[in-house]
């Protein structure tokens, strides 16, 4: 309710909402995302974009979120499959693609979105393969961004990708 009130007070026309992975909850936090969408819809007229975890492949949880009808539902691939063990140890590339596919299978009217970080050591051919995989999963929107290490404890930036490449 507080988030919905803040969105209303700020007069936002588009809100992007994300969270940490909630594997500690039986539904991976799906009911929280759904309740939030309903609260926002009651308080204001705002496009709602959710960025969700993979829900550990729980498609009942995904349906809970989809029934709330966010305008955009995103799940980030983050990197190329070769780098998953280093960058996304808890994630599974195929499970992420399957989640994106199921968004479109279940609710084709909802836009699906994913994101990819560049500069972690990926090769251009690998990036293009991820793009093909996302397209096969019927992902509507893809964001590409430069990876920046939040601290020295995080993965180092292997390469700065010049904006001309984007």
Image (spheres, rainbow, N blue to C red):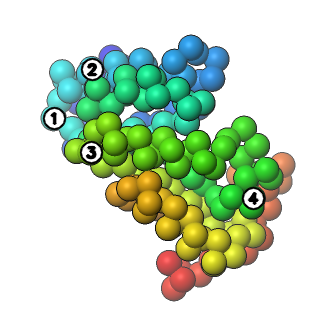
**Residue position for label 2:** 39
* Residue on which the image places disc 3: 108
- State how far apart marks 1 and 2 are (Cα): 11 Å
Tell me: 104 left or right of 76.
left
Q: Is residue 146 visible?
A: no
**What number of labels is visible?**
4
Q: Please report the residue visible at 20 percent of the width from the left and 26 percent of the height from the top.
A: 41
Q: Which mark is residue 67?
A: none
Label 1 Cα crowd, 10 Å radius (few <14 / some 14-19 / many 20+): some
Residue at the left extreme of this rendering: 45
* Disc number placed over residue 45 in the picture, else none: 1
Q: Quadrant of the N terminus?
A: top left
The one nearer the camera, 151 or 83, is 83
Residue 34 locus on image (x, y percent):
35, 23
Marks 1 and 4: which is nearer the front? 4
Q: Which residue is mark 4?
A: 83
**Residue 129 relative to residue 18: left or right:** right
Outermost residue toward the bottom? 164
As measured in the structure, the alpha-carbon distance from the residue carrying label 4 to the one carrying label 2 is 38 Å
* Cα gap from disc 3 to disc 1, whole angstroms: 22 Å
């Amino acid at each position: 309710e507080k988030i919905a009130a803040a969105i209303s007070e700020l007069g936002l026309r588009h809100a992007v909402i994300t969270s940490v992975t909630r594997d500690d909850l039986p539904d991976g936090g799906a009911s929280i995302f759904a309740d939030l969408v309903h609260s926002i819809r009651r308080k204001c007229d705002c496009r709602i974009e959710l960025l969700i975890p993979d829900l550990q492949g729980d498609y009942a949880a995904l349906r809970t979120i989809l029934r709330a009808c966010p305008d955009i539902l995103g799940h980030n691939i983050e990197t190329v499959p070769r780098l998953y063990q280093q960058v996304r140890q808890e994630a599974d590339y195929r499970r992420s693609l399957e989640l994106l596919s199921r968004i479109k299978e279940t609710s084709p009217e909802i836009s699906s979105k994913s994101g990819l970080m560049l500069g972690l050591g990926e090769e251009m051919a690998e990036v293009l393969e991820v793009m093909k995989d996302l397209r096969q999963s019927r992902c509507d929107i893809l964001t590409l961004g430069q990876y920046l290490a939040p601290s020295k404890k995080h993965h180092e930036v292997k390469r700065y990708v010049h904006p001309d490449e984007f």
